Amino acid sequence: MSYLTDRKRATGLGSSKSGTAHHLQTMIGAVALAILVPLFVYAFGSAIGLSYEDAIAHFAKPFNAIITGLTITVAMMHFRHGVQIMLEDYVHGHTRTYLIAGAACLSYGTIAVALFALARIAL
Amino acid sequence: MADVNRGNRPLSPHLTIYRPQFTSVTSILTRITGNALIVGSLLTVWWLLALASGPDYFAIANGVMTSWFGKLVMLGSLWALCYHYLAGLRHLWWDSGRGFELDKAKTLATIVVVGSFVLTLLALLII
């Protein structure tokens, strides 16, 4: 008889070895976005079509500024996780590495630009 | 003899060999909408940057945003956001180990598709 449990025998035999943490991070971001996105659609949607002065006043309000900054940050990290999975499915070799790095640059860059813009509007 | 046929072995079947089904199309659309949302996101952040840069630059970005092209991108993004939102909730539901039965999967797929249009209309009405 075997003293190993079924789970212990199976552990580490999968083809990928890693990925649980990646999936978990994507899903934690998804739960956060499930709350943030409706608030963001309201905060941002009501700003489209405003005049320059009104739009500045709109994003100077703490609620609109914080919700917008938080949503863009979490959404771009969620994009970074998701686009990496897509690239790993369809692109191979060095191209894959370069594109994943490029997507990371795009994600962090977008976050930085958005937070800079919001800080400048609000302060 | 294991390497005799290396490079010319049959590959496991990929997407192209399967007939598209309602549930599989809704799954693929999750990925397409999620990645396509980068376009609307970049337009949004560019618009914010323009707003922070002053009235002159804002006039340009706001002009693009409220043009027929900008409106098309934003409307498309809104639908993609609603679709990806519902499909994401479906994924969280699946992660809890539920909803994999054929009839339930079909019901979930219908909810995601119909719900995405309902949510889009609802968002447009509220905004």
Image (cartoon, helix red, strand yellow):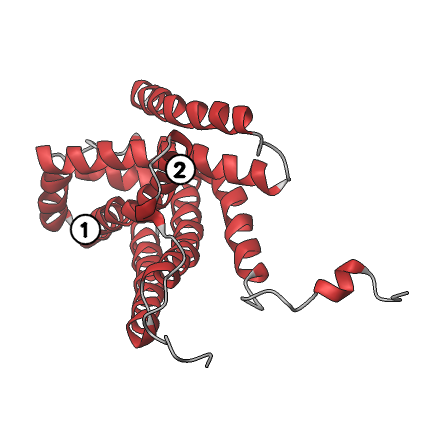
Return the x and y of residue B21 as percentages of the image width and height: 37, 33
Asked whether B11 or B111 is in front, the reply is B11
Residue B118 lies in what quarter of the image? top left
Circles 2 and 1 on the same subunit: yes
Q: Is residue B107 visible?
A: yes
**Which residue is the extreme one toward the front?**
B1
- Of label 2 and label 1, which has the lower sequence position? 2
Residue A25 lies in what quarter of the image? bottom right
| Amino acid on which the number 1 mark rests in the picture | Ala
| Left or right of residue B63, residue B34 in this image | right
Pinpoint the chain carrying mark 2.
B
Q: Secondary structure at mark 2?
A: helix
Asked whether B20 or B55 is in front, the reply is B20
Return the x and y of residue A16 as percentages of the image width and height: 54, 66
Residue drawn at the location 78% of the way across and 59% of the way down:
A6
Asked whether A89 or A28 is in front, the reply is A89
Residue drawn at the location 83% of the way across and 61% of the way down:
A5
Residue on which disc 1 sits = B50
Residue on which disc 2 sits = B24
Return the x and y of residue B41 as percentages of the image width and height: 28, 47
Pinpoint the chain carrying mark 1.
B
Near mark 2 (Cα within 10 A), the count class, few <14, some 14-19 or many ≥20, is: some
Closer mark to the observer between disc 2 and disc 1:
2
Q: Secondary structure at mark 1?
A: helix
Near mark 1 (Cα within 10 A), the count class, few <14, some 14-19 or many ≥20, is: some
From the image, which quarter does the C terminus of chain B lie in?
top left
| Above or below: residue A50 compared with residue A11 | above
| Above or below: residue A68 compared with residue B23 | below
Return the x and y of residue B20 as percentages of the image width and height: 33, 36
Q: Is residue A35 visible?
A: no
| Amino acid on which the number 2 mark rests in the picture | Ser
Residue drawn at the location 53% of the way across and 55% of the way down:
A23
